[in-house]
Amino acid sequence: MARFFAAIGLLNLVIFSTSFLAAEEEVMTNSWHVIFKRDVDHQTAHDVANRNGFLMIMPMLGSKREYHFMHPQVKSNRKKRSIRHTKNLKLDPLIATAVQQAGYKRSKRGFKPLKSLLDEEKPIESINAFPPKKGSNEEDPLFDKEWYIKNTGQAGGVPGLDLNAEAAWAKGYTGKNITTAIMDDGVDYMHPDLFDNFNAEASFDFSSNDNFPYPRYTDDWFNSHGTRCAGEIAAKRNNGICGVGVAYNSKIAGLRMLDQPYMTDLIEASSMSHRPDLIDIYSASWGPTDDGKTVDGPRNATMRAIVKGVNEGRNGLGSIYVWASGDGGPSDDCNCDGYAASMWTISINSATNDGRTASYDESCSSTLASTFSNGKPGYKDAGVATTDLYGKCTTKHSGTSAAAPEAAGVFALALEANRKLTWRDVQHLTVLTSKRNHLEDPTAHHQWTMNGAGLEFNHLFGYGVLDAGDMVDLAKDWKTVPERFHCTAGTVKGVYKFDSKNALKLQIDTDGCRGKKNQVNYLEHVQSFITLNSTRRGDVTIYLTSPMNTTSLILSRRPNDDDNKDGFNKWPFMTTHSWAENPRGKWILFVTFSSESEEFQSGNLFEWTLMLHGTQKSPYTSQTSPLIHNTKSKLALVKRQHERAAEFQF
Ligand SMILES: *[C@@H]1O[C@H](CO)[C@@H](O)[C@H](O)[C@H]1NC(C)=O
Ligand SMILES: *[C@@H]1O[C@H](CO)[C@@H](O)[C@H](O)[C@H]1NC(C)=O
Ligand SMILES: *[C@@H]1O[C@H](CO)[C@@H](O)[C@H](O)[C@H]1NC(C)=O
Ligand SMILES: *[C@@H]1O[C@H](CO)[C@@H](O)[C@H](O)[C@H]1NC(C)=O
Ligand SMILES: [Ca+2]
Ligand SMILES: [Ca+2]
């Protein structure tokens, strides 16, 4: 079964299922996660590694008990576990346990292999940034092409459909003293447009375990991804080179972690927990393969790293994890990607410069908001202009890859406006300031809908496109949101059949844990943990309707997913669409087959657990931002709604 480590509590990590069954393409690596019987210092860990023939790579998750060991004589892509090596480690008097690490695939979003680049009419366009122009106030040659920052209608776009970054800059926010880590294939930190904004102290290379996350050379520039993402955030302004980053005075750290034959849980976990005292935002434009049939997510150590990050990172305010929703196109669903679907990551979809989704855009109900990737097909310069490898610039960056760093840049501006923002504050600000603007689904399948709290959302775009100007405004006077609580609304267990002719409708009636310590009155995230199997997993479609009649499409059809045995095992389908709603009342789960073929399909649902996350007090009534007086602002709207509801509900 597709398994997933689901942590529901904030401090107590609840692990629902304890082992991943190795997928076919998994291997065993030469890395071991070693847990000592007691805390040991660095030197002791080294000595213990040495006396067993291993190398100590690094401590794990800031712990003195857990270490990453490597065995130089073991192959890094074995078919089987090396029981002998694990046994030897376990026999060491200081070691409690040791787990050999599986190696698996993680792919970067939006990279087109050389072949498809050559197939395109125009090959990739790289503009030489050398020699850097002298003088401090020279215009950046690519700025006019950065329609995502300032859309004047260039490349066939809609004027004004952009991140509204200039409004934030005009107020003096440019990302000063905020660091975003690019978790990727490295960063060309020698690039003249990035050099000054590179935070070397916060950087690391987890692919080769050293301090220099410089991209490895390949003929097809495969490792240009991280450098391109970095420029979108922190390319310098007015230096006559390439373009301008969204937060052009912020710092970027390079965390090189995608460039080794196989990903391991330890590499992911180490990256996501690297220097949370120095790194504010972690930007990731990668994940499980976007083949439309994978169901995968963070494993043990990575899940612990994320939970630790949101609880302890940034001195307890919480690390901000920004995630690209995926490039699997309409035939994939990012709720099957456990990183994007996590409550602790902000998953970002992308829009084109004329307000549509791109053909590769993957959607799901866990997406919070959107930024931009490439523009209108067929238009020159419709791609994302940014820095490129070896001091060059490009106008062709694309994919949801391009979208996540833009969001990281906007969040850097917001954090500069208010250093006290928690990880949840950033999500609330995103919901309240994102805009519908000109975003529309051309197929009209996914309409803009008002949720029960008066917040407009769209399955493709979340709460809309980020607005940096409004976000810094609201951030400035923002009062930290009230404490978060977790309420299990209910569990339905049994054998519930559904098939091509008969859909399944289940109901959970909840009081939102009323009268208990963990009562939830105002929702943030809602999770449905579902266990089911079916004759064709990709044809199963699931809707969740809240008591306030907001319907989230929590699983859409995935035509390529022909799984007929694994199904889902306590998989956490997440929705953000009931944000700020009152959870009390009937929740309805609707499970159906939507298939194009006539073939008869059937399935069984074994379990549905509904988890509500949110606050007891309204997070909005205590806000003093001047925006509260703008009766048209989302803040004013949702505050009024909460006040009206509170009169008779609690
Ligand atoms: C910059 O940020 C660090 C924490 O990331 C903080 O310790 C330091 O005081 C800040 N400096 C300024 C000038 O704000
Ligand atoms: C994951 O963690 C659980 C509990 O801590 C442990 O029993 C299990 O062996 C771990 N699995 C892997 C693959 O590390
Ligand atoms: C689902 O699981 C049940 C119980 O294990 C089994 O009887 C049934 O054949 C399975 N169905 C499919 C489609 O795999
Ligand atoms: C709930 O919303 C649906 C549209 O999503 C609408 O057709 C229906 O009438 C609504 N029901 C109630 C009771 O408001
Ligand atoms: Ca520049
Ligand atoms: Ca995907």
Image (spheres, helix red, strand yellow):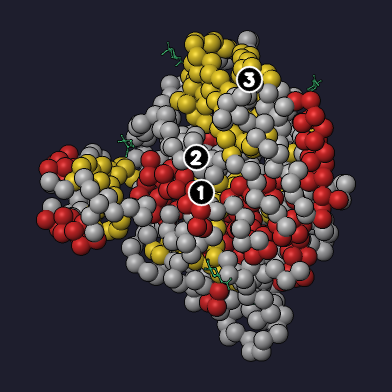
Graded by Cα atoms within 10 Å as few (under 14), some (14 to 19) or many (20 or more), the crowding at tag 3 reads some
For marks 3 and 2, the one nearer the N-term is 2
**Percent position (x, y) of residue 227?**
53, 66
Q: Disc 1 beta carbon < 8 A from ligand 1?
A: no
Q: Label 1, on which residue?
A: 310
Q: Secondary structure at mark 2?
A: loop
Q: Label 2, on which residue?
A: 10
**Percent position (x, y) of residue 193?**
58, 76
Q: Residue 401 is drawn in which quadrant?
A: bottom right
**Percent position (x, y) of residue 261?**
35, 53
Q: CA distance from mark 1 to mark 2?
A: 9 Å
Q: CA distance from mark 3 to mark 2?
A: 21 Å
- 467 relative position to 574: left or right: right
Pointer 3 with pointer 2, Cβ within 8 A: no
Which label is found at residue 510? 3
Q: Which of 449 and 24 lies nearest the eye of the viewer?
A: 449
Q: Secondary structure at mark 1?
A: helix
Q: CA distance from mark 3 to mark 1?
A: 28 Å
- 286 relative position to 159: left or right: left
- 14 relative position to 443: left or right: left
